[in-house]
Amino acid sequence: MSEESNNQGRAYEYICLLTLHKEINEFRNAEIEQNSAYNAAHHAWTQVGKVFQNILLESAKAAAATIFDMEPMIIEKAMIC
């Protein structure tokens, strides 16, 4: 795998994570643990161009919607017993 392809994949991981975080937080609290993988993905995100970032963002939104369709309990509010 080329370095460019690897960085694009990390950039996609980053925006998918942020998109899922944002969408889940509309229903319940979610936190992102920042570690070396997060930092590498964030750095990769800053290295890709704005046009490519927009493409990745739209794809991440579609991916999040698909994940929620497949696993609706992710966005259901937890019941307190």
Image (tube, helix red, strand yellow):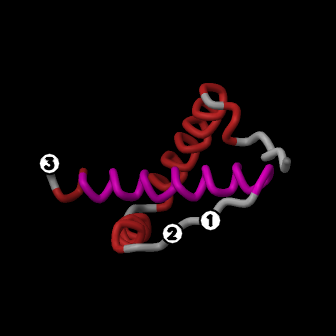
Depth-wise, is mark 3 or mark 2 nearer the camera? 2
Q: Which residue is mark 1?
A: 31
Direction from residue 55 to residue 40 in the image, left or right: left
- Please name whichever residue, 74 or 56, is drawn nearer the observer in this view of the structure: 74
Q: Secondary structure at mark 2?
A: loop
What residue do we see at 65% from left, 34% from top?
68
Direction from residue 15 to residue 28 in the image, left or right: right
Q: CA distance from mark 1 to mark 3?
A: 31 Å
- Please name whichever residue, 52 or 6, is drawn nearer the observer in this view of the structure: 6
Amino acid at the residue labelled 2: Glu
What residue do we see at 42% from left, 68% from top?
38
Mark 3 or mark 2: name the one nearer the start of the chain. Answer: 3
Pointers 1 and 2 in contact (C-beta within 8 Å): yes
Quarter-of-image position of residue 77: top right
Where does residue 16 sit, x and y in percent of width and height?
A: 52, 50
Depth-wise, is mark 1 or mark 3 nearer the camera? 1
Amino acid at the residue labelled 3: Met
Q: Secondary structure at mark 1?
A: loop
What residue do we see at 49% from left, 54% from top?
51
Q: Is residue 50 above or below residue 71?
A: below
Q: Which residue is mark 3?
A: 1
Magenta stretch containing residue 23, yes or no? yes
Quarter-of-image position of residue 7: bottom left
In magenta, the rendered stretch is 6-28
Q: Which residue is mark 2?
A: 33
Magenta stretch containing residue 65, yes or no? no
Q: CA distance from mark 1 to mark 2?
A: 6 Å
